Amino acid sequence: MFKGVKRVLCGGIDKRCSYAFLLILCGFLLSTKMTTPENKEHWNTIILDGTIPEEDIRRMIGESYDLVTDSPSRRIYEAVRKIPEGKAATYGQIAELAGDRKMARAVGNALRKNPYGESVPCHRVVNAKGELSGGSAFGGEEVQARLLEAEGVEVREGKVDLGKYGIQI
């Protein structure tokens, strides 16, 4: 889409760099709110004067992005994505996989707010007794049961046999 080199002025220094790379850099900074004062501890100063190789700039951006975007919710969603089809995990197990077994309640809160839809299989998470979430979470107990059963997990009286279908950490 964007070919060639664009001449830009960054911090008073005239620099030639790829236009596509600049768009990626600017989009990254804006999308992660890296430029806001509350994220000052995560700032990397990048002077585009040609002395820093583009690979190093990309690495610095990646490191900053990892720092800024690391959150309990993100780790929870990543942990839930690791539950294989046909298996179930408890809120406590997901909390442990996300880095802190004590945040089992935070797992429930994050899953209720899941912004990623079906890519995070929330229906595979049950309580420590194997009971389904009930209420309005994940579409209700009936929906959660249907989704689990479609994956081969037996649900009896609103419960999953964790001995048979539970993941091992």
Image: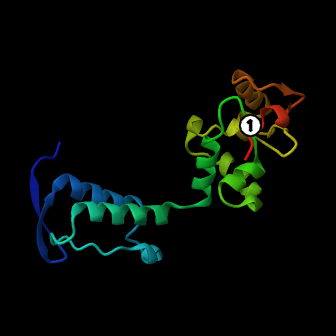
The residue lying toward the viewer, choosing from 155 and 163, is: 163
Q: Is residue 122 left or right of residue 70?
A: right
Within 10 Å of the Cα at label 1, are there few (<14), some (14-19), or many (20+) other Cα atoms? many
Q: Answer whether residue 118 is visible to the viewer in this image.
A: yes
User: Who's the residue at 14% across and 77% down the image?
Assistant: 12
- The residue at the point 57 percent across, 61 percent down is 71
Specify whether 54 is left or right of 132.
left
Q: Quadrant of residue 84?
A: top right
Looking at the rendered structure, the kind of residue marked 1 is Ala
Picture quadrant where residue 28 is located: bottom left
Mark 1 residue element: loop
Expressed as whole percent of the image width and height from the top left, the position of residue 105 reads 76, 56
Point out residue 138 in the picture as x, y percentages from the top left corner. 70, 37
Seen as rendered, the residue at the extreme right is 157
Residue under the point 71% across and 55% down: 96
The structure's colour scheme is: rainbow
Q: Which quadrant of the structure image shows residue 154?
A: top right
Residue 147: % across, % down = 70, 27
Inspect this view and state whether residue 29 appears.
Answer: no
State the residue position of label 1: 88
Q: Residue furthest front?
A: 168
Residue 112 in the image, given as x and y percentages of width and height? 68, 46
Front in this rendered view, residue 145 or 112:
145
* Residue at horizontal 31 percent and vertical 75 percent from the top: 45
